[in-house]
Structure formats: structure tokens, C-alpha cells
Image (spheres, rainbow, N blue to C red):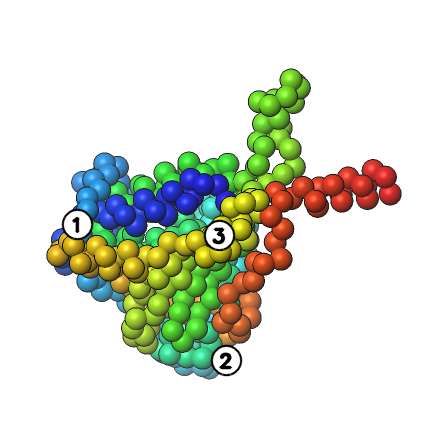
């Protein structure tokens, strides 16, 4: 994994935004501009000025979106749910999980989500056995990495309004800074006590050959840096329709960088809970954040969740397994061995 991702993880934990315990007043909404990615609206007093400080208190927010599901399992509801799900999944595929969504795509997706939430067949989804398993993120109306409990915790230490808008801007700038990277699979593994986020990504190992050799060639070598950022959170409270999460660790798994991989496999990880507890012991106004993560729709194959600001995350169930992905078979050679094998088999038979 690129080392600046590791730096970001550390920076976000040790530099919490200042917050005060205030009631919810306003929520930043995504803009309707038709750009490459739906950035957040920083109008009003929520400007892009970041003011990090060493003290914080947890904002005890309530759910941003409360939906009363219609749990009638009649044939009409079943048929309507099926149609809405097909439309939502087709839209998600067409706009690359939301990353390439236009303003109209977002409006349509949110309308479909609202309709599905009112037809959720399970009244208390986080208590249902269907919730457990491995889920793949197929759509979001915000940055995909905000499905990680790590970034939810970062948001939870911000007060609503201005600081929430600043955090939205920071997340958009983080993705813009990493535009050279490609986001792969984004998963959540949900068990009775844990929620694990797996965020796979890759970037060119040698992006521009002409920077290193005197060749008139603008491309790079077919070698990539791969890895997965794995964030583990404890489910502190199961509220029936939402989880209250507490971050435990952040680690990088499956890195294909020689040397770094061995250090990571030896147990190198960010101990978020321990670091937060240390801050609590020396900063009286700081408390480890416990973000609220809602489940607003659930059936056997689809889940819709929202964070504390109502941002949407749609997941498709991959399996009932509650075990995290095993990355031990990923080779730590920057893909050189597979490249050489491809050259030999393609060019020399």
C-alpha cells in the first residue's frame, strides 16, 4: 500500500477535530452539481477551513433518518421490492458504485432507496440473523471509504454544521489526492460482536517510465502496489435498527510490497482503541467516539445502511461467512512474478 495511506490513518486518529456536545441542528447535503464525483455542499457557514485540535468530546447524535418500514410481506410488496432492487442495482452498476454518478443518478438512487426503506421486510434488522455475513458495497452517495468505521469515527468527533462540512471537504480532498489509485472491493463483515471493513486498493508502482529511462513513452510499467485497509470495530450497542460502534484497530493486509509486507504480517497495526484510551486519560474533555451506523433496509440479499448524516451505503450479500478475508496468499513481489509468467506464456509459448 502507498505509505501516505498509512500516514492518513495515523493523522486522523491523533488529530481529532474539536467538538462540543450540541444538539443536531443541520446536516450537510450533497450538492446537485453534475461533476465527476458528488462533492459535499459547503454553503453557508461550513467552509473548507480545517481546524484540528487535540481535544474533543463525542457528539451524542440521534439517527439522521428515521424510517418506519412497512413489514407487510404481501405479494404486492414483494413484487415492488424486487423491482426497486433491480432498478437500484442496475443504476449502481452503471455509475461505478456512485463514483461516476451524475446529479440525476443520485436523485434517482436516493428515491429508490427511500422507497425500499419504507418496504423493509424486517422491523429490527440488526437483531435479525440475515444481518450476519460478508457484504460488498455496491453503491454510495458519498466517498466509498466512508463506509469504514474508521471514517465514521472521524465524523463522530465533529459537531454538526460547520465542522461536519469541513470533514466532508477533507474526505473529498483525500479522494482527490489519491486519484491515481483504483478502488477495488469494498466489504463489511458483520458478526454478533464485530464489524470489519475491508477496503482494497491499488496504484501504479512505476507510473511514468519516462521519468526513469530515456524513452518517449508516457505510460508506466504493468506493476501495481496492492493492499487492503482493514478497520475493525466492536459493536458496543445493538439498537435493533442501528449499531453503536467503537474502533479497535486499523491495519493493512495483503500488501505486495516486499519488506513492508513482512512487517505488517508481524502485527504492525494502529491500535485505535488504545490510543483513544490514552487520550482520555490525559485530556478530560476527550472520549472515544462511538458512531451510529443505521440499517434501514434488510432482506436475504440486500442491505441499506446510513451514517449519522444520512449518507447512503448499499450492500449486496456475498456469503454468510463472518470470517475476514484471508490475504496470506497474496505475493509480496509487486506482481513481478505474474508479469514474468505472462510474458513467458504469451511471447514464448
Where is residue 266? Give x, y as percent.
49, 56
Q: Residue at x 36, y 38 (%)?
A: 173
Residue 318, image x, y percentages: 55, 67
Of 338 and 18, the residue lying toward us: 338
C-alpha separation, residue under disc 3 versus residue under disc 1: 30 Å
Q: CA distance from mark 2 to mark 3?
A: 51 Å
**Residue at position x 35%, y 68% in the image:** 234
- Which circle, 2 or 3, is nearer the viewer? 3
Q: Earlier in the sequence, mark 3 or mark 1?
A: 1
Q: Nearer the viewer, residue 260 or 74?
A: 260
Left or right of 218 on screen, residue 263: left
Residue ID for mark 2: 75
Q: Which residue in the structure is indicated by mark 1? A: 55
Give residue 153's quadrant in the image.
bottom left
State the image coordinates of residue 101 (x, y, percent, origin top left). 46, 46
Label 2 vs 3, first from the N-terminus: 2
| Residue under numbered circle 3 | 264
Q: Residues within 10 Å of mark 3 (few under 14, many from 20)?
A: some
Q: Residue at x 44, y 69 (%)?
A: 190
Q: Is residue 220 above or below residue 142?
A: above
Front-most of residues 123 and 7: 7
Quadrant in the picture for the C terminus: top right
Callout 3: helix, strand or loop? helix
Amino acid at each position: 500500500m502507498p505509505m501516505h495511506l498509512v500516514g492518513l490513518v495515523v493523522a486522523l486518529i491523533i488529530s481529532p477535530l474539536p467538538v462540543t456536545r450540541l444538539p443536531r441542528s443541520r446536516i450537510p447535503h450533497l450538492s446537485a452539481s453534475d461533476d465527476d464525483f458528488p462533492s459535499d455542499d459547503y454553503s453557508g457557514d461550513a467552509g473548507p477551513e480545517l481546524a484540528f485540535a487535540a481535544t474533543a468530546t463525542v457528539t451524542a447524535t440521534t439517527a439522521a433518518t428515521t424510517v418506519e418500514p412497512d413489514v407487510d410481506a404481501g405479494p404486492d410488496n414483494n413484487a415492488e421490492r424486487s423491482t426497486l432492487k433491480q432498478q437500484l442495482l442496475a443504476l449502481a452498476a452503471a455509475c461505478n458504485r456512485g463514483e461516476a454518478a451524475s446529479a440525476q443518478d443520485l436523485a434517482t438512487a436516493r428515491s429508490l432507496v427511500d422507497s425500499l426503506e419504507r418496504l423493509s421486510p424486517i422491523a429490527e434488522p440488526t437483531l435479525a440473523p440475515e444481518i450476519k455475513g460478508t457484504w460488498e458495497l455496491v453503491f454510495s452517495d458519498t466517498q466509498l471509504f466512508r463506509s469504514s468505521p474508521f471514517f465514521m469515527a472521524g465524523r463522530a468527533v465533529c459537531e454538526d454544521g460547520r465542522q461536519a462540512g469541513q470533514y466532508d471537504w477533507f474526505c473529498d480532498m483525500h479522494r482527490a489526492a489519491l486519484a491515481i489509485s483504483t478502488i477495488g472491493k469494498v466489504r463489511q463483515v458483520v458478526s454478533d460482536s464485530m464489524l470489519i471493513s475491508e477496503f482494497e486498493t491499488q496504484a501504479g508502482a512505476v507510473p511514468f517510465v519516462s521519468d526513469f529511462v530515456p524513452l518517449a513513452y508516457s505510460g508506466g510499467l504493468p506493476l501495481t502496489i496492492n493492499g487492503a485497509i482493514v478497520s475493525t470495530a466492536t459493536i458496543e450497542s445493538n439498537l435493533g435498527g442501528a449499531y453503536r460502534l467503537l474502533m479497535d484497530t486499523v491495519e493493512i493486509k495483503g500488501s505486495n510490497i516486499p519488506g513492508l509486507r513482512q512487517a505488517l504480517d508481524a502485527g504492525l497495526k494502529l491500535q485505535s482503541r488504545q490510543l483513544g484510551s490514552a487520550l482520555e486519560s490525559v485530556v478530560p474533555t476527550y472520549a472515544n467516539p462511538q458512531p451510529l451506523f443505521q440499517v434501514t433496509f434488510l432482506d436475504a440479499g440486500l442491505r441499506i445502511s446510513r451514517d449519522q448524516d444520512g449518507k447512503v451505503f448499499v450492500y449486496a450479500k456475498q456469503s454468510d461467512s463472518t470470517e475476514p478475508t484471508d490475504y496470506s496468499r497474496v505475493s509480496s513481489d509487486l506482481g513481478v512474478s505474474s508479469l514474468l509468467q505472462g510474458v513467458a506464456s504469451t511471447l514464448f509459448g
